[in-house]
Amino acid sequence: MFLQHNCPDCGSTNLVNNGHTYYGKARRKYKQCGRQFVSVRQRAPLSTDQKRRIELLLAEPISLEGICRVLEIKAHQLYAYMDELYAEVPTDLACSIRQPAEIELHCLDCETDELWSFVLYKANKQWVWVALDRATRQVLAVYIGDRGAAGAFGLWQAVPDTYRHKATFHTDDWDAYKQIIPPEQHRFSKQKKHTNHVERFFCTLRQRASRLVRLSLSFSKKLDRHINSIRFVVMHYNLSLQV
């Protein structure tokens, strides 16, 4: 059991009784600021070890309810810490961008493709657009939206400036790419061999993100968590390549 003594808002210890909750637990109140709480908390806050395990399990194909069962924690504890982790994901997805000296020696080749997913129900399609460095296999950018030109433009804006100005982009024959990528930087073909690396990454992504597993009940119910969870898995993927 965990007892709360000092108010996190005002720091006061001046407490008064304030009745009982619906479940019969004694409720108390800080007299100075009026903050109310239950005097005895049945579950302690997450430990450092539990937080570390949550971070690792979120990058594996296990449902959120499964994580709660394994760690013996409540869902609201998991969601609160999960949102904290998602907020810390860097905008560059921990991708190590090649420097100008390296670029002069090597040409920049990127592969882009899109992966089908949905939020809440299958009619609400959310396409995962990915740009991948062919040499390092690192994911440069991720954008989630529709499959039209707006989605392609969102991915193009998310690509780092160095690649957007100097790289050659290999895609399939989808028209949305032709509307956004400059023709001198665009190479497209109906043959999958020109995008086989990013296609292979999609297989890894479906194996690592439970929300993308086909015929699963672990699909996302909210768009923001769908986006953040995919970015979180991609960040771990990039970090694993650097190690």
Image: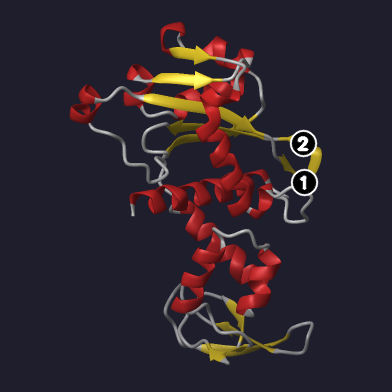
Residue 204 x/y as whole percent: 57, 47
Evaluate if marks 2 and 1 touch, with contact meaning CB atoms under 8 Å apart: yes
Q: CA distance from mark 2 to mark 1?
A: 7 Å
Q: Quadrant of residue 82?
A: bottom right
Q: Which mark is residue 120?
A: 1
- Quadrant containing the N terminus is bottom right
Is residue 165 positioned above or below 200 on the image?
above
Answer left or right for 38 relative to 105.
Answer: right
Mark 1 crowd level (few <14, some 14–19, many ≥20, 10 Å Cα): few
Residue 199 x/y as whole percent: 57, 35
Q: Residue at x 23, y 32 (%)?
A: 99
Q: Quadrant of residue 146?
A: top right
* Whether residue 26 is visible: yes
Residue 102 x/y as whole percent: 22, 30
Q: SS of the residue at dot 2?
A: strand
Q: Residue at x 54, y 58 (%)?
A: 59
* Whether residue 181 is visible: no
Q: Residue at x 61, y 15 (%)?
A: 173
Q: Which mark is residue 124?
A: 2
Residue closer to the observer: 196 or 113 = 196
